[in-house]
Amino acid sequence: MADPISNPLQPFINLVQANMALLSKYAMSPEAMTQAMAQMQAAMTQGPGAAKSMPQPATVFAELAQGMMENYTRFMSELTQSGMSFMTPRSR
């Protein structure tokens, strides 16, 4: 991973790469697909109350959302670091 201070676009590149890796992990995971299908079928057959009966932290969507929030938090940190580097004087 390149230093976010040396390239101002690096935080954006890192965010895209991290989100692509996260999405491909869930898109390619048979366990995630099986769990998502089971949750969808339960919601369709049991109605709106089915989602409440499932533990929220164990849902695939919650794990995906948590991963994306972690990626976004890392992005904001890198963006702040790169922004601060432009404000500091550089020696020649």
Image (tube, rainbow, N blue to C red):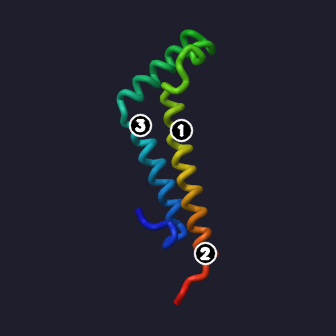
Q: Amino acid at mark 2?
A: Phe
Q: Amino acid at mark 3?
A: Ala
Determine the secondary structure under disc 3: helix
Q: Position of residue 59 (x, y in %)?
A: 50, 26
**Which residue is pictured at 60% across the width and 75% down the height?**
86
Q: Position of residue 37 (x, y in %)?
A: 45, 22
Dot placed on the residue nearer the N-terminal end, 2 or 3: 3
Q: Amino acid at mark 1?
A: Gln
Q: Are marks 3 and 1 in contact (CB under 8 Å)?
A: no
Mark number, residue 26: none
Look at mark 1 in the image and give the residue it sits on: 66
Instruction: In this rendered view, identify the residue nearer to me: 44 or 87.
Output: 87
Q: How many marks?
A: 3
Mark number, residue 86: 2
- Rounded to the nearest whole Å, what is the CA distance between mark 3 and mark 1? 16 Å
Q: Position of residue 38 (x, y in %)?
A: 45, 18
Look at mark 3 in the image and give the residue it sits on: 27
- Rounded to the nearest whole Å, what is the CA distance between mark 1 and mark 2? 31 Å
Q: Quadrant of the N terminus?
A: bottom left
